[in-house]
Image: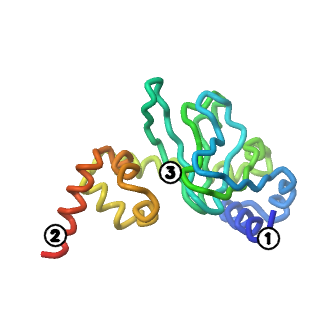
Amino acid sequence: MHLEELAMFLSFFNKLGIKDEIIKEVTPKLRLMELTPSQVLLHQGDVQQYGYLIISGILRASYFYHNGNERCKEYYFQGEMSFLYSAWLTNTPANYQIDALKSSKVIRIPLAILNTKSWQLAKLNLLKQQLLYKEEKEVFLLLKNPEERYEHMIKYAPKWLNNLNDIQLSAYIGISPISLSRIKSRIKNNINN
C-alpha cells in the first residue's frame, strides 16, 4: 500500500477515535484493490467479511430480483466506508450486492478488526454515523416530495449529481427518469425567471 492510501486510512480511523499505533498494527491485514466497473465485492446472499474504504471511484449496494430487475440501496463515494451494517452486526447473509459502479480504488478491511477490544470506539462511532445517516435518509424519502429531494441533492449532495446519471439519480429519488427531467426543467425555468 502506498503512503497516500495509508494516510487516508489513518485519517479516516483517527477521526473515529483510533490512535495511529493501533491502526498500524492491522495494516498487514489490509489489501489495496483496483476495481473495474461492475466488479462484485460482495454477492447478494454471501456472508460479509470485509468493508471497503473508498480511495477513488464509486461503489453501490443493490438488490437484484429474480426477474433481473435491480434496486439500488446506496451509493458510496471517495472517503466513505462501504459495507452492510445489518449483515455485519447479525453475521447473516447479505441482502444486497456491493459492486463498483465505476473504476475504483479501495482498501479492503476485515470487519473482524472492528469487533476487537481496541477498535470498539471506531465501531461505536461508525454505528452513530450510520444511525444519523439513516434518520436523514428517512426524512429525505418520507417527508420530501420528489422535487424537494432533488433540490436537497443540489444543495447537500453535489457529488451525487456530478457522478451519477439521471437513471441512477431518479431510481434513488424514487421517480422515473422522465419525471426527473421535468423537475430539472422546472427548476431551471424558475432560476431563469
- Total label count? 3
How far, Cα to Cα, is label 2 from label 1?
A: 47 Å
Amino acid on which disc 2 is placed: Asn
Nearer-N-terminus badge (2/3): 3
Q: Is residue 139 above or below residue 150?
A: above
Q: Label 3 amino acid?
A: Tyr
Where does residue 136 sit, x and y in percent of width and height? Answer: 41, 52
Q: Residue at x 36, y 45 (%)?
A: 171
Residue at point 19%, 73% (across, down): 191
Residue at the disc numbered 1: 3
Does 122 sit above or below residue 112? below
Residue bearing the label numbered 2: 190
At label 3, counting other C-alpha atoms closer than 10 Å, the crowd grade (few under 14, some 14-19, many 20 or more) is many
Position of residue 72 in the picture relative to residue 104 (left or right): left
Quadrant hosting residue 102: bottom right
Label 2 close to label 1 by CB (< 8 Å): no
Picture coordinates of residue 82, whole percent (x, y): 60, 49
Farthest top residue in view: 66
**Is residue 109 toward the left or the right of residue 103 in the image?**
right
Q: Nearer the viewer, residue 177 or 116?
A: 177
Q: Quadrant of the N terminus?
A: bottom right
Q: Badge 2: how crowded within 10 Å, few (<14), some, or many (20+)?
A: few
